[in-house]
Amino acid sequence: MYWQRDLVVWKNDPKMYGKQQAMAKSVDFGKQKGIYILYDHHTVVYIGRSVDRPLGKRLYEHTVDRLGSRWNRFSWFGLLGVTQEGNLRESPLDSSLAALVTTLESLLIEALEPPQNRKRGDDFAAEYIQDIDPELKEREIQNTLRSIESKMRGGS
């Protein structure tokens, strides 16, 4: 929920990192399939699906189309599970009618956060918090080093 657009390096096949808790290993959800919501802060501006193209590619497309300047956050609800090794499963979750209804209810509860629902919509899956793309971390380190070097040269 509410992942930040600027923590992803947007390209044709982006990586979108998330983890279940702070010290856990990151998982790349760029190839996930499912439903996504684009927000301008907390206001919903677009809802879409990712079936024939992976989630990362669909979101990338929205960085260069008519929605490009209209969103800064996104939520997504994936159908592909995560293996013990931290990879996406190729096959979707259980596709029975009961599982579909449970998934839809949980998705709506999570996305809309209705105040009268006592239970959260997490009966069907795990929630992953966003992790910054390592490429962005590396850029930040390099920028910091250049800044320090510049200050050291200027101070000599």
Image (tube, rainbow, N blue to C red):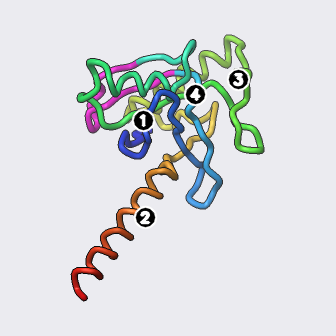
Q: Amino acid at mark 1?
A: Trp
The reply, left or right, for residue 5 in relation to residue 99 is: left
> Which one is closest to the eye, mark 1 or mark 4?
1
C-beta proximity under 8 Å, tags 1 and 3: no
Q: CA distance from mark 2 to mark 4?
A: 32 Å
Q: Secondary structure at mark 3?
A: loop
Using the image, determine if residue 101 lies above or below residue 23: above
Q: Amino acid at mark 4?
A: Gly
Q: Amino acid at mark 3?
A: Leu
Instruction: Report x, y in % for residue 22.
Output: 56, 59
Closer to the chain start, of discs 1 and 3, is 1
Q: Secondary structure at mark 1?
A: loop
> Which one is closest to the eye, mark 3 or mark 2?
2
The residue located at (64%, 31%) in the rendering is 124
Span of residues in magenta: 35-47
Q: Residue furthest right?
A: 84
Q: Secondary structure at mark 2?
A: helix
Closer to the chain start, of discs 2 and 4, is 4
The residue wearing badge 4 is 78
Q: Amino acid at mark 2?
A: Ile
The residue wearing badge 3 is 93
Callout 3 crowding tier (Cα within 10 Å): few <14, some 14–19, many ≥20: some
The residue located at (56%, 41%) in the rendering is 127
Using the image, determine if residue 101 lies above or below residue 106: above
> Which one is closest to the eye, mark 1 or mark 3?
1
Q: Main secondary structure of the magenta part?
A: strand
